[in-house]
Image (cartoon, rainbow, N blue to C red):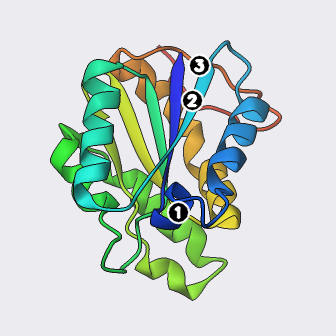
Amino acid sequence: MHIVVVTISDRASKGIYEDLGGPLIEDWLTTAITSPFDVTRRIIPDGFESVRDTLIDLCDQERVDLVLTTGGTGPAPRDETPEAMRAVLIKELLGFGELMRRISLDQTPTAILSRQTAGTRGRTLIINLPGKPAAIQMCLDAAFPAVPYCLQLIGAGMIETDPNIIKSFKPAN
């Protein structure tokens, strides 16, 4: 199981701003997943081409199982992660974004501005997470129970989670 965490931020990619989201996601994964996996982190600038090209490379060349992005999902001019995602995806899974926005609205009214999405390309699942650390944690807690089964359905690597942290849902056969 190979997971890549991609932080999408002009400032973090230039070293102006410390990447807080990527390390948080990696720590969360290390706590929640009990099966063997490796995780790689990348920091790239905002923008359609940067995000699109990185995601295509991760899916088609590196053939990773799961990509978790953070950042670039708001309404600012350089926030083009969802547009780049839609150019890459074969199947969009709208329920992930709907759930993340719904759960985030419990904490902040500006969650309605967030444009997270998820989907698949080949045997890779890609999920856009928000950029703020508190929102990342909340969204992972809410959406990750569906991830192991989704990975199974698309033929990606298998993961098991610690049920005390995240109880994954897999339908009975």
Residue contact between numbered discs 3 and 2, judged by CB atoms under 8 Å: no
Which tag, 3 or 1, sits closer to the chain's start? Answer: 1
Nearer to us of marks 3 and 1 is 1
The structure residue drawn at horizontal position 77% and vertical position 27%, both measured from the top left corner, is 162
Which tag, 2 or 1, sits closer to the chain's start? Answer: 2
Tell me if mark 1 has few (under 14), some (14-19) or many (20+) residues whose alpha carbon lies within 10 angstroms of its own. Answer: many
- Residue beneath disc 3: 159
Residue contact between numbered discs 3 and 1, judged by CB atoms under 8 Å: no
Seen in the image, is 67 located left or right of residue 141? left
What is the three-letter code of the residue carrying label 2?
A: Thr
Which quadrant of the view contains residue 63? top left
Mark 3 vs mark 1, CA separation in Å? 23 Å
Q: x, y (%) of residue 169? A: 57, 31
Tell me if mark 2 has few (under 14), some (14-19) or many (20+) residues whose alpha carbon lies within 10 angstroms of its own. Answer: few
**Front one among 128 and 39:** 39
What is the three-letter code of the residue carrying label 1?
A: Pro
Does residue 110 lie above or below 149 as drawn?
Answer: below
The structure residue drawn at horizontal position 45% and vertical position 64%, both measured from the top left corner, is 10
Does residue 33 lie above or below 126 as drawn?
Answer: above
**Front one among 57 and 73:** 57
Q: Which residue is at the far bottom?
A: 109
- Residue beneath disc 2: 40
- Residue beneath disc 1: 130
Tell me if mark 3 has few (under 14), some (14-19) or many (20+) residues whose alpha carbon lies within 10 angstroms of its own. Answer: some
Q: x, y (%) of residue 50? A: 29, 51
Nearer to us of marks 2 and 1 is 2
What is the three-letter code of the residue carrying label 3?
A: Ile
The structure residue drawn at horizontal position 48% and vertical position 26%, both measured from the top left corner, is 149
Residue contact between numbered discs 2 and 1, judged by CB atoms under 8 Å: no
